[in-house]
Amino acid sequence: MAAGGAWASTASDTGRATCAQGAGCVVELLRRARRTEHEAATGRWIGERLAGLLGYEYGGVHAPDTDADAAPPERYFLPDSTLSTADARALRIHGPEQLLGGVVPHPFVATKSITHRLVDGARVVPVGWSHALGAALDEVTVPGFAAFSVDDVARAAKQLFEQGLPARIKRADGIGGVGQSVATDRKTLDAALAHLDVDCLERLGAVVELNLKPVKTYSVGTVAVGEQRIAYFGMQRLTRNRHGVAVYGGSSQACLRGGLEDVMATLQDEAERRVLRCAIRYDAEVSRAYPEFFASRRNYDVALGVDPSGVPRTGVLEQSWRIGGATPAEILALEAMHRDPRLSQVHVSTHETYELIDAPLGAQVYFHGEDPAVGPMTKYAVLDAQDDAHGR
């Protein structure tokens, strides 16, 4: 451990990836402007474990000048965000087997914005927008709109108000519950509008949707790395950061070999089956609207709650085609399946808390220390239980 207890990386965010000549190599690909210490430590942990799964070396952070001549199969990329088609071409990434993440034709496709149709009479419509996708997703999302201007956000919120519904306004690129506010009237709406980043809004958009309370958030998805392919179904939990704001606190999930249709066969509860059907439909509709899209990690957050009238609502809130909070747990599941071909299912979990605690025995800790940006933090993953091919 480094000073302060944080797991440190030997390759800095500005460092160079290093791998033996001709060896397969996992490299981190940084596209966000900056990342915190806990994010850097988590990225390194994931990269090292992926290298072990693939039989590759871990090379640290990708440096374009040193990696330019490498043959594409020799580099496996770990991006910190979903890549654009142009970025992927420049890196000679042609398919999902070359990265843990996804590739989209337009930046906004990687965000929450595509979850809803545009507000009626939208002033701003981004190039590449699919009107058909928004209509197709109406049945598997909660009521809401996408907007790419302050005026359109305001009009979308007012349309929800007219139906007696509170509006949750979300930055399209927000992560872990950050960048969200709830508006119930003109005063709270004006306050929310004042905090919008206009430049980001024009590029990526925002979501204005029904605020469900109470709500359960499920995590549904698939991951493919090398020869291993798993699907999972689980639930997220919240925690409070040092400012007292409710943010992502981890998730628990059951992972099995195969795809989401295989998961469906294991679910008995009709509400959970409805959650899974929403994720499956969402995934299929995005691929239909944007055939250039591909991803090796497909994660969907699905809400199950009630509206102010007591009407049950189920719908996909957002997608993630990049590494996320649940990725360390997914890695543990992939490793377990790799070690024992008889395993049919494993139960895994991730945990994030904004204090320094002792992780339970057997936990895989990937950050424990003081992060200058967020304060004290502990992050770890646990392989909870395993079932062999006969379900024992």
Image: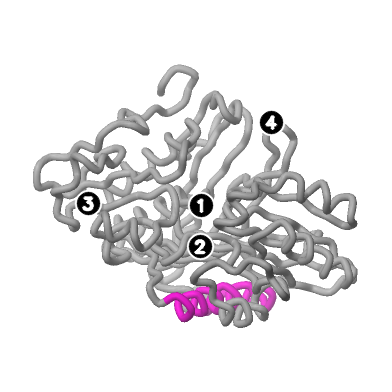
Q: Residue furthest top?
A: 3
Distance from Cα at disc 2 to Cα at disc 1: 9 Å
Compared across the picture, whether 141 is left or right of 220 comes to right
C-alpha separation, residue under disc 3 versus residue under disc 1: 23 Å
Q: Earlier in the sequence, mark 3 or mark 4?
A: 3
Instruction: Using the image, determine if residue 173 lies above or below residue 38.
Output: below
Q: Quadrant of residue 113?
A: bottom right
Q: Indicate left or right for 10 with 31 as reference.
A: left
The image position of residue 124, as x and y in percent, is 63, 66
What is the C-alpha distance between the residues marked 4 and 2? 27 Å
Q: Which residues are magenta?
A: 264-290
Q: Quadrant of the N terminus?
A: top left
Spatial CA span between label 4 and label 1: 21 Å
Give the crowd class for mark 4: few <14, some 14-19, many >=20 residues within 10 Å. some
Which residue is disc 2 drawn over?
Answer: 299
- Of the residues shown, which amino acid type is indicated by label 3? Arg
Q: Residue at x 89, y 70 (%)?
A: 162
Residue located beneath label 4 in the image: 242
The disc, 2 or 3, on the residue closer to the chain's N-terminal end is 3
Identify the secondary structure beneath mark 4.
Answer: loop
Q: Disc 1 designates what residue?
A: 326
Reply above or below: 12 against 81. above
User: Which residue is identified by label 3?
Assistant: 75
Residue type (three-letter) at the residue carrying disc 1: Ala
Q: Which mark is on residue 47?
A: none
Disc 3 element? strand
Q: Are marks 2 and 1 in contact (CB under 8 Å)?
A: yes
- Write the residue at 40% across / 77% down: 291
Q: Residue at x 64, y 77 (%)?
A: 140
Please tell me how crowded label 3 is: few (under 14), some (14-19), or many (20+) other residues with Cα within 10 Å.
many
User: Helix, strand, or loop for circle 2?
Assistant: strand
When asked about the image quadrant of residue 211, the answer is bottom right
